[in-house]
Every structure is written in structure tokens, then in C-alpha cells.
């Protein structure tokens, strides 16, 4: 399976998911449900965006994703 798996395509799918979460609206819910929806959307976006920025490789049949969490210098 490792030979068939496209790491860059997977990372691209996470990039698209991050964009989708960022651009989706909030459904017509109120109160605690609305807050939970918004908090979940923030978490989803962070997770997808982090994986979208990953450098990926398959090494000895193991998928390795490297994510640099260091603060970027201006």
C-alpha cells in the first residue's frame, strides 16, 4: 500500500478541509449548542491546518508527518 499512497494528495485534502471549515457558516442554533459548534469548528480548523502544513514521507512503510510548531520569525 505504501507504494500506492500519495502523501502530498493527502496533505492537499487536509488543506481543502481547513478551507472548508473556515468558510462554512454557523447553523441556526442558539445557546450552548451554538458555542459548542463554534468551538468544534475552531478545533477542526486548527487540526486540519496543522496537517495541511506538514511535510510528509513514507519511510520503511511508515507514514511520517513533520509539523514545525516553532513560532515563525517576522
Image: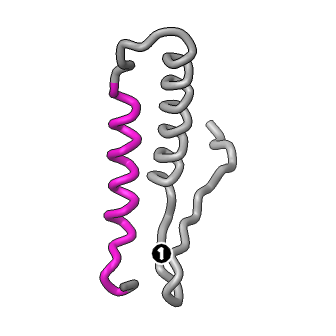
Report if residue 59 lies within the magenta region.
Answer: no
Quadrant including the N terminus: bottom left
Residue labelled with disc 1: 57
Q: Residue at x 32, y 64 (%)?
A: 9
Label 1 crowding class (10 Å Cα cut-off): few <14, some 14-19, many 20+? some
Image spot of residue 3 (x, y percent)? 35, 86
Q: Residue at x 53, y 49 (%)?
A: 50
Q: Quadrant of residue 20?
A: top left
Q: Residue at x 36, y 62 (%)?
A: 10
Q: Which of 68 and 60 lies nearest the eye of the viewer?
A: 60
Task: Assign the magenta stretch its main secondary structure.
Answer: helix
- When the figure is inspected, residue 57 is found, relative to residue 36, above or below; the finding is below
Q: Which of 28 and 8 lies nearest the eye of the viewer?
A: 28
- When the figure is inspected, residue 1 is found, relative to residue 47, above or below; the finding is below
Residues drawn in magenta: 3-24
In the rendered view, does 53 fall on the left or right side of 12? right
Q: Which of 40 and 45 lies nearest the eye of the viewer?
A: 40
- When the figure is inspected, residue 53 is found, relative to residue 60, above or below; the finding is above
Image spot of residue 7 (x, y percent)? 39, 70
In the rendered view, does 72 fall on the left or right side of 3? right
Quadrant including the C terminus: top right
Toward the right, the furthest residue is: 70
SS for dot 1: strand
Q: Quadrant of residue 2?
A: bottom left
Report if residue 15 lies within the magenta region.
Answer: yes
Image spot of residue 63 (x, y percent)? 50, 75
Amino acid at each position: 500500500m505504501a507504494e500506492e499512497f500519495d502523501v502530498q494528495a493527502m496533505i492537499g485534502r487536509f488543506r481543502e478541509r481547513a478551507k472548508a471549515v473556515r468558510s462554512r457558516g454557523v447553523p441556526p442554533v442558539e445557546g450552548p449548542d451554538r458555542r459548542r459548534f463554534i468551538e468544534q469548528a475552531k478545533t477542526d480548523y486548527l487540526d486540519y491546518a496543522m496537517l495541511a502544513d506538514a511535510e510528509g514521507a513514507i519511510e520503511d512503510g511508515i507514514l511520517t508527518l513533520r509539523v514545525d510548531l516553532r513560532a515563525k520569525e517576522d
